[in-house]
Amino acid sequence: MNKVITLMIALTVIVASMPAEAGLGVKLKGGYTYISYGDYNDWADEVNKAIPSEYPTYDNINWIPEVSAEFTFPIFPAFSGGVGVGYLSGKSDYNATIGTVSVSEVHKVKAIPVLMNVYWEPSLQSIKPFVYGGIGFYRTSLEFASSFSQGGQIDGYTADMEKWGFGLQGGGGISLSLAPKVSFDVGIQGRWAEISGFEGTATRLNGDQKEVYLGKGWEEVDGVDVYYYGPISKDETMEEASVNLSGYTIFIGLTIGF
């Protein structure tokens, strides 16, 4: 987060130092994003197959809110650049009680992409199309909280992991003029961003801590093969899992010129 704040301060100083006639602006977007979320959703689907129909199942993480803000500046006629940040987050909550056994699991994902885009927008009056594309650097954090209780005995852990990753985005839409330097935007964006290499710390309820990485795979528990996704101790070996933020966003927004 400190890197993102430092970048935004630097951008603000650059923008403030440029003349008003430079054609600067701000693009604000907000909407809902569909992400495939890869390995976690695959794990949830696999676990749900084994859960009896009368009990709750795990939710996939698919539709999540997303917002972004970009400073824009002219490059060539009809072309402009944009630099800014975004924010998207999702959550899956699971709680079930089977007889004397209670299970609670929470998984959260948050991403703050640093965005760099190039926009094409023809010089029309009240209604004009636009298209854009660019790259993003995603600071992505994962949170896990799991507890299991039976007969008064409680066990569980919390874990936090993070990783910077790379992504590509592009989209387009229609811009409707509301005032000389204000327009309303509506459009759709596609994204590719699959991130791996997550590491962090897991803390058991008794206070014990371990360095962990994000893993997935089949393991035997009490003679039964189960599919696992989540934090793995670094002294254990399991296939590394990834976080897939690829998908598409349906958004609305405002473009404000300076």
Image (tube, rainbow, N blue to C red):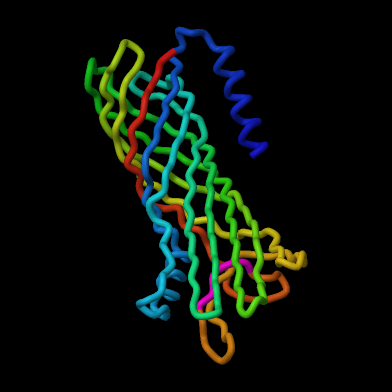
Q: Residue at the spot x=69%, y=70% of the render?
A: 233
The count of marks equals 0
* 130, above or below 42, in the image: above
137 to the left or right of 131: right
Q: Position of residue 256 (x, y in %)?
A: 40, 18
Q: Residue at the spot x=63%, y=32% of the render?
A: 5
2 to the left or right of 81: right
Quarter of the picture holding the N terminus: top right
Is 228 covered by the magenta stretch?
yes
Q: Position of residue 70 (x, y in %)?
A: 47, 28
Provide the major secondary structure of the magenta segment: strand
Is 158 covered by the magenta stretch?
no
Q: Position of residue 154 (x, y in %)?
A: 66, 73
Between 187 and 230, the one nearer to me in the picture: 230
* 28, above or below 241, in the image: above
Q: Residue at the spot x=31%, y=40% of the render?
A: 188
150 to the left or right of 184: right
* 128, above or below 212, in the image: above
Q: Residue at the spot x=28%, y=25% of the render?
A: 175
177 to the left or right of 166: left
Q: Which residues are the magenta region? A: 227-231
Q: Position of residue 253 (x, y in %)?
A: 36, 29
Quarter of the picture holding the C terminus: top left
Between 11 and 218, the one nearer to me in the picture: 218
